[in-house]
Structures are given as C-alpha cells and as structure tokens.
Image: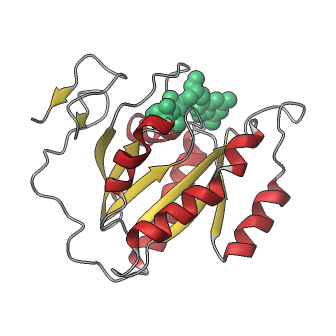
Amino acid sequence: MKVVLLGDSAVGKSSIVETLMTGQCSQQHNATIGAAFVSKTIGELNLNVWDTAGEEAYRSLTRLYYNDAAVALVVCDVGVRQTFESMASWCDDVVSNTRGRGDVKIVLVGNKCDLAPSQRVVAEDELQSFARLRGLEYCECSAFRKSAVDALFEHVAEVASGRKSSGSSDRTDITTLRFGESITTFEGLDARSTNTQSLE
Ligand SMILES: Nc1nc2c(ncn2[C@@H]2O[C@H](COP(=O)(O)OP(=O)(O)OP(=O)(O)O)[C@@H](O)[C@H]2O)c(=O)[nH]1
Ligand SMILES: [Mg+2]
C-alpha cells in the first residue's frame, strides 16, 4: 500500500518519516532531493512510504510519485502560514494527476503542533474547516513526538485499509531498507544521509 507525503519544503515530511522509522528525528533541515522510500508494517498492512521533495524545483518530479498511491499526506507547518495556503494546490495537484484511476485518499496534516502558542500561526480550527470544506480527514502531528507520529500512521493504515488495493501499489523493483541503516532513494540522491544507497 503506497503512501506519499507532500507539502512545501521544510514542513517536516522527512522528519515525520524518520520518527516513524526510528522513534526520533534530526533537528536539521536537509532538503530532500527527488524522493526517498521506506517500508513500514502496521498491523497486517505493509505501508510503502514515499517522502517527496517540497522544493518548487522538484514539483514536476514529485507528481510522478502520486501514481498508484493509496493515501497522500498533504503536510503543512502550523508555524508558517504560506505552507497552509499551499495545501489547496497540493490537493488539487493530487486530484488532477491521479484522475481516471480511482481515488487517492488525502489526509491533511498540521505538523509542528509542539510549537508554543505564540509561534503557532495556523489554528487547528482553520485546518479543520479547510478539511471539512474539502471532505478530507485532518490530523495534528509533531515529528518530535513519537506518539503523535504513531497515531498519524495508525490513522493512515485505517484509511488505507478501507480502500481496495489498486493492485499496483506494491513495488517489487525497489529494495526495502530501514531508516538509519540506509535509505533507498529512487533518484539515487538523498541529501539527508551519507550512507544512502542509490538505485541506478
Ligand atoms: N518544532 C518542530 N520542528 C520540526 C518538526 N518536524 C520537523 N521540524 C523541523 O523542520 C525542519 C524541516 O524538516 P524536514 O523534515 O527536513 O522538512 P521536509 O518537509 O522534509 O523538507 P523538504 O525535504 O525540503 O521538502 C527541520 O529543522 C526539522 O527539525 C516538528 O514537528 N516540530
Ligand atoms: Mg524532506
């Protein structure tokens, strides 16, 4: 079951994936180049999680990863209003690039909810309203809190299993490796780690 993380640069997509895999994440922003792939089993479900690059320069490349995704997590940083405003276009992008092959479940994620109230500029209410308007699910998250990331992916697993598999979501041409040991990147590039193995 393929899950793809989307959203502006520095919202914390890679951090969420790192916490999912290792229980904690780095405090630094190493912009993802291309996309990175990890695999995680939750209950009976094997989730193939694709962490994409948020930088605008990679946008057309990122669209390639929407294909055959069961769930798309559209992530914003609740401390940066622009990342919330971009959510609509990320959602539109998913819809327009996956039209005709069944629906992709979109889950909106407000990340960095650990921020102090004075630093938070996007209220949970606004996110909830946007989600309602679009008929989507919304989850608060903090990549700095393992429990929040675990709860998010439990939810993702529920959303994913409520949907029929497209049959093409399990990629067998890619080696599954654990975060921390090494992370396989589809483009063969990953700014995050030096022990990256590339697939050429
Ligand atoms: N306070 C706080 N900071 C976070 C959280 N998640 C990520 N960060 C920080 O935000 C910065 C960016 O995180 P990344 O995970 O690299 O962001 P990204 O969305 O993968 O960015 P791109 O790869 O460029 O698209 C890092 O400095 C993280 O430590 C969070 O939940 N809370
Ligand atoms: Mg990243």
Tell whether 186 sits left or right of 149: left
Ligand 1, what quadrant? Answer: top right
Whole-percent x, y for residue 91 in the image: 56, 62
Question: From what the image shows, is residue 70 above or below residue 189?
Answer: below
Whole-percent x, y for residue 132 in the image: 74, 74
**Colouring method of the image:** secondary structure
Whether residue 24 is visible to the viewer of this picture, yes or no, is no
The residue under the point 80% across, 67% down is 129
The residue under the point 64% across, 54% down is 87
Q: Nearer the viewer, residue 161 or 14?
A: 14
The C terminus appears in which quarter of the rendering? top left
Question: From what the image shows, is residue 87 above or below residue 105?
Answer: above
The N terminus appears in which quarter of the rendering? bottom left
Whole-percent x, y for residue 168 in the image: 20, 71
Q: Nearer the viewer, residue 78 or 86?
A: 86
Q: Nearer the viewer, residue 137 or 82?
A: 82
Whether residue 67 is visible to the viewer of this picture, yes or no, is yes
Q: Quadrant of residue 117?
A: top right
Question: From what the image shows, is residue 150 above or below residue 72?
Answer: above
The residue under the point 40% across, 34% down is 22
Q: Quadrant of residue 151?
A: bottom right
Tell whether 101 sits left or right of 54: left
Q: How many marks?
A: 0
Whole-percent x, y for residue 136 in the image: 63, 72
Q: Nearer the viewer, residue 113 or 13?
A: 13
Tell whether 177 sits left or right of 150: left
